[in-house]
Image (cartoon, rainbow, N blue to C red):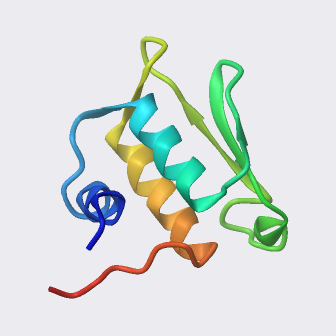
Amino acid sequence: MSQRQKLLTKWKSNPPVEEEIESIISVLDYYGINYSIPDHLVIHDDRLSDLQEVRGGITIPISKGRKVKKIYLRRLVRVLEILGVYEEIDT
């Protein structure tokens, strides 16, 4: 299991209270996910457009300019599962 895969598994099952935005950007870049960061992290992908759950994208607030709270880490993992880039590996 890669380091990014371990990080995603941690975010899904037992996320920290906050995670540095740099870790999230690293994961998104690795999987080729489109995003922008004005004041929030905005993830957009055509594959999300038909899903009522996320309505074409997801907006994640950035706390204190550089951290993301755990509720949003779980949402991020859910979006990555929908996009098919993350599947939990049983160990």
- Tell me residue 5's x, y (percent): 33, 66
User: How many dots with numbers?
Assistant: 0
Residue 57 in the figure: left or right of residue 17: right
Furthest toward the left, the residue is 91
The quadrant of the picture occupied by the C terminus is bottom left
- Which residue is found at the position 45% from the left and 61% from the top? 77
- Tell me residue 49's x, y (percent): 84, 66
Residue 34 in the figure: left or right of residue 83: right
Indicate the quadrant where residue 63 lies. top left
Indicate the quadrant where residue 72 lies. top left
Residue 60 in the figure: left or right of residue 75: right
Furthest toward the top, the residue is 64
Front-lying residue, 87 or 56: 87
- Tell me residue 37's x, y (percent): 67, 27
Indicate the quadrant where residue 82 lies. bottom right
- Which residue is found at the position 33% from the left and 42% from the top? 70
Q: Is residue 10 above or below residue 23?
A: below
- Which residue is found at the position 40% from the left and 48% from the top? 73
Front-lying residue, 8 or 14: 8
The quadrant of the picture occupied by the N terminus is bottom left
- Tell me residue 71's x, y (percent): 38, 46
